[in-house]
Image: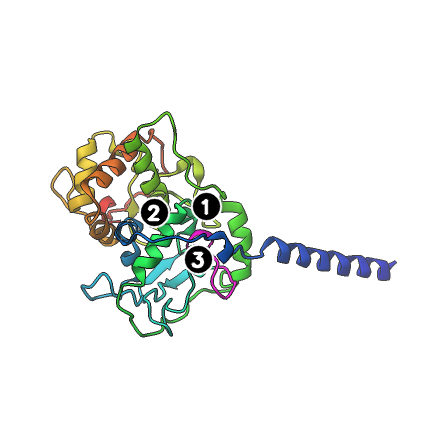
Amino acid sequence: MLRRVAVFIVIACVAGLGAFWWLTIPVSVPAAALPAYTPNLANGLTTFNAGGCSSCHAVPNQPDRTRLGGGLAIPSPFGTFYAPNISPDPSDGIGRWTEADFVTAVTEGTSPADTHFFPAFPYTSYHHAKLSDVRDLFAYLKTLPPVPGKVRDHNLPFPFNIRRAVGIWKLLFMDGKRFSPDATKSVQWNRGAYLVNALAHCAECHSPRNFLGGIISAQRFAGGPNPEGKGWVPNITQKGLADWSDKDIAYLLETGILPEGDSVGGPMARVIKNTSQLSADDRAAMAAYIKSLPAVDGPPKPKGNTQHDHGS
């Protein structure tokens, strides 16, 4: 009897491990899925700015937004991540990546080594990006200066350092859908929806997360604890921005100045360095979409939290 129980346990464990391994296979985009294409470098620059690439990947404490040698520390409840080098350096950056490698990384969160990237890289939002934008971005990045220097490994405790387990996280929190325009809305609204939800990945910071680190979909854009630690990220639905006009939002995205005359700080200041480079039309589109978000109650703010909301 005991032998049968032992055999059953072994079989169950093997089956469980097999199921786990199958469910967590990293997804890749094959080169054959990328037909011949002439990249648009101007659109690549727009995608670079909308995607906020320099916010995380520019070498810290230097003024050049195009030196993408990485190294920025990104604290989280799961440990500290360090933004990688995505400059065209062939040894330490992405200089040897193929276009398929890049498209796979950005839209599927899978590395050229066929391992999962951790979701500190906001591929859950980039997954919605247009393939042409991602290809244009890759072409643009190749025009930037190579920056030598390897970035240190992430500092994550067990079990959060197990990359294979990220495959289960993706099954739970990646919806597998590309952006689809809403035919009942205007061209401007759809452009704003695309920028906010895909490239600019606004929900990644402006939404509360559950204990697994996934966005709580019912409170998307409703603000919450700063995922980087101190402070509180503001609610950008009409619950938080009811008194703001479209122009107020667009002006913030251009200048970082709030309607009352104060200015943003912290990570949001890095965001403004990117959105300020977008066209006025794109900022207006983002503002129109954000202004259309229905009011949603966010999580209660802890008493005694004196951090400036807009500093996040």
Looking at marks 2 and 1 on the same chain, the residue that comes earlier in the sequence is marked by: 2
Q: Can residue 228 be seen in the rendering of this structure?
A: no
Kind of residue sitting beneath label 1: Asn
The spot of residue 295 in percent (x, y) is 33, 29
Q: Secondary structure at mark 2?
A: helix
The spot of residue 173 in percent (x, y) is 49, 46
Q: Secondary structure at mark 1?
A: loop
How packed is label 3: few (under 14 Cα within 10 Å), some, or many (20 or more)?
A: many
Q: Are marks 2 and 3 in contact (CB under 8 Å)?
A: no
How packed is label 1: few (under 14 Cα within 10 Å), some, or many (20 or more)?
A: few
Q: Label for residue 199? A: 2
Specify start and end residues of the magenta stretch as a single range. Answer: 106-116
Q: Which residue is located at x 80 percent, y 57 percent?
A: 8
Horizontal relation, residue 27 to residue 189: left or right: right
Residue where numbered disc 1 is placed: 210
Q: Which residue is located at x 37 percent, y 68 percent?
A: 95
Residue where numbered disc 3 is placed: 105
